[in-house]
Image (cartoon, grey):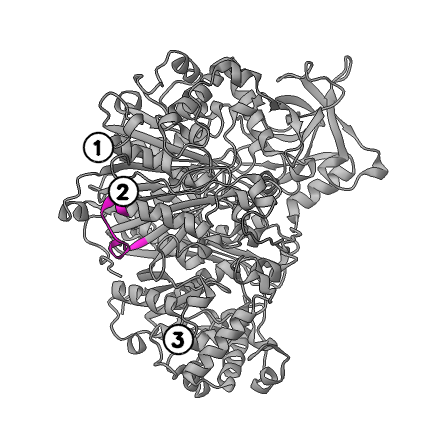
Amino acid sequence: MAVRPVGDGRGRGPGGGTVRKVGVIGAGMTLFRRRLQETPKELCYEAARMALDSAGLDLADVNMVVSGSAPDAFDGVHMKGEYFLDGCGGYRKPYTRVYTGGGTGVFSTIAGWWHVASGLADVVLVVNEEKMSSCQPHPQSVFANIWDPILDRPLKPNLVWIFAMEMNRYMTVHKVRKEDIALVAVKNKRNAVEHPCAQLADPNITVDDVLRSEVMAWPVQRLDISPPSDGAAAVVLASEDFIRRRKIRDRAWISGVGWAIDSTMWTDRDLYFPEYVARAAKMAYKMAKIDAPRRQIDFAEPYDPFDYKELHHLEGLLLADKGEAPILTREGVTQRDGKLPVCPSGGLLGVGNPIAATLGMKIGELFWQLTGQAGGRQIPHEVHTGVSQAWGDLMQYGCVVVMKA
Amino acid sequence: MRVGIIGIGMTAFRPSTPEYSWKELMFEAASRAYADAGVDPRTDVDSFVTCAEDYYEGFGIFDEFVPDQLGAVLRPTCTIPGDGLQGLANAFMQIQTGLVQVAVVEAHSKASDVLTLDGVVEHALDPIWNKPIEMHPFVVAGLEADAYLRASRTSLKALAAVVSKNRRNGLRNPLAAYGADVEEDQVARSEERFAPLRSLDIARPADVCVVLVVASERAARKFHANPVWIRGVGWASDSPTLETRDWAGATYARLAAEMAYRHAKVRRAATEIDFAEVDDRFSYKEPQHLEAIGLARKGEAGKRVLKGEYGPDGRLPVNVSGGSLGCGNVFEATGLHRAAEVALQLRGDAGSRQLDGVKLGVAQAWRFVPSATGAVAVLGVAR
Amino acid sequence: MTVRNTKWPGVELSAADLHEGKVTSTRFRPDAKYAWSAGEAMSRFLEELQAGRLIGRTCGKCERILFPPRMFCEECFRPTDEWTYVRDTGTIETFSVSYLDKDAKRITEPILVGVVSLDGASPKMGMMHYFGEMTKDDIHIGMRVKAVWKAPEDRRGSVLDIEYFRPVREGES
């Protein structure tokens, strides 16, 4: 277990010098499907193996492992991070699981980043997994337990309610029509056609299809949502030293990280704007020395479990003014060939939503786009800087990673 | 750069805390830690790390319920499903990046809110290979105890001595829940539960919250703090699969200690470490862990505890706090409690259980049955 | 991703595969039951609900009236100061018309649910609850509503001691 000694003299923060550089050098993911046969350990292994192979590395090259996975109740094992650590390559290594609700899809990379940037590791494998299909009769039931037991649970809330309430607030404050929101679902499900792992790609979907889909909890309709999935994804992070020594050419640098959580008391907050995303973005942009994100960011992978969330998060990421994201979408700015491609991967709406495994579309996609490996999804113009973001908890959690070529 | 502990806040260990919600318990420990460190969490803290598992708490995403009572609203916060020492290790790494100057680490146990603790622990067993056997999860501890005792030739009497020592140590710790004058033959006569473990070999659950404030050297000086330096941290996982793991030797602890000692430049732990706080949630774990982390040679720890070497007046005091046997099993807060204890001793703040002249201590914990994951921290003050 | 990765792992199963035993599976129902201490703030909150009242806490430093009540102010990070009642009237901040129950099963009569900010508390301090005596076409953000309480002997010390919030009628404050 090769671990670099602490304090190699490069750990100084903003105002004190450069923070140690960390790059993404490999990525992998499994198919995302409503139900996969593989066990959690097997899903982890497949993604981890693919990521290592893509970086030309073996497990012996890995110093530490970080895993990310959301509610244990889905996979049906308490302390599931322990349970599947061997599939993640964590056997007899320093291994840690992180878990920030839906934010885990991006947050585990932030944790992996600090493992390397601290000087304690040269190579870190980050593996995210989710197996929602294990939960019977339906993973929805797990969401009964995310609510406050005294204030919320007695009302028997369904998870979709809270999204519906947030979506309604957003639509009402900014006078956004459902048609404009539906454009996001159409864009992402169409973008996903070029994603080999996609669960919900649809080349022919129209706004009409979305507007005619079953109303779940108004204003949310069936095609506004990404359904539950099984899947895993992994990335390999490495220090600049390691990348240089091994002459690794396919790499994308992590130039900024940020994360923030808002108050548990969600009924005391105005849900129309995700302040917690803005705080996380500002933290990441500061580290990345980005002071004009709309100019300096070329493409974005915000978290889109629901179509309106992409708009909500674009504004939180300061890539659109409050209320402006639907306009940009309508004008085609966020199409893959637009000025600011958003969710070129197809996002959660198109590829699927195995919560933490969305790492594949958030960090994975940035890596593939920035190293020219995105195949049919490659943005047709040159891109240098991308931002990814995930969201989680009770409309509370935001985390942001900025990457550059 | 050096990273130190500048604030310690702990509530008392209690078998149950019906008057507090978990939020109020956390607020109390956090308030104490911030007062100790002289920090305002709303302006002075860059990162909050909490250690929790959904199933120990009873929530789908426990992360949601942490920020308000820690002063973490709209601040960088995360949850590590892991032992408090793993949380400490991550806060340490965050500070080493230079991005974070001051971090807060929190862990708690509200075991009294869990009506079916054994059921929750059982739920961690492998669903395909182990759950169908329908065994009580502590059978794993019994099996491991048996393997360890045979491999190390440690006697049951040594286990009784550990229980007696730690329960009595608990009497001198005002925070401990289970301090008691337990005699060794009482332990031997207590009901056999998971052979060879008897009921007094098993730590009873308790509620507690522990909060540490951790800072870079530069930030620590700004707060005029007397830091306890984190000289090294290490953590590791052995095979999670029961059928393929090392049963006798606590490999996770050995690997974690190797990493921590390397950072701390400790070459011969047995002579350089002054005292230790290790995980003793089953009595046999104390000698097993001591051997794994190099504080005793294989097979020696049991003999040394019988000779009194690990007592508060011994050559290498172990679990002067009372350990988990004396304080209570506080699940994911175990390691953070150990780190807090070591830090209090090093600062000279350990009250009537203060050890004289200690400068270097080790805190160690594991993630309990059925895991094979653990962490170690080496803490020190200037010699 | 493209040139090097040509095989995408994952074997898809259908619901039938699982339920008809076409794939090997194992079942387990965890024994995981909890009873959370409500703590000081929530205990009082529930007692007051049983008495037909809504109670909050004040923070003397930021001068907010916090609802639901809490023993510490999360902004100032200090203990809150006093108990104070808030009114059972308020404004709809947001809502949803749900055709799903908590297990994601479809229902034909929609549930009207949302967040009400309460008069007497600081702005936007609210609670989630049902709405009644209104149709899905009546309900709107900004609507003024009032709690409908269960009869005293039916109250249990729960948010369900309120049946729902109904529109404020003409002449009511």
Residue C17 highlighted magenta (yes or no):
no
**Which element carries disc 3, helix, strand or loop?**
helix
Q: Which mark is residue B290?
A: 3
**Which element carries disc 1, helix, strand or loop?**
loop
Task: In this rendered view, identify the residue nearer to me: C87 or A10.
Answer: A10
Percent x, y of residue B335: 44, 62
> Mark 1 and mark 2: span between their CA atoms?
14 Å
> Mark 3 and mark 1: span between their CA atoms?
48 Å
**Which element carries disc 2, helix, strand or loop?**
strand
Quarter that holds the C terminus of chain A: top left
Q: Left or right of A190: which side holds A405?
A: left
**Rendered image quadrant of residue C102:** top right
Task: In this rendered view, identify the residue nearer to me: B307 or B159.
Answer: B159
Q: Could you tell me if residue B341 is visible in this image? A: no
| Residues in magenta, as a range | A53-64
Q: Residue at x 23, y 28 (%)?
A: A384
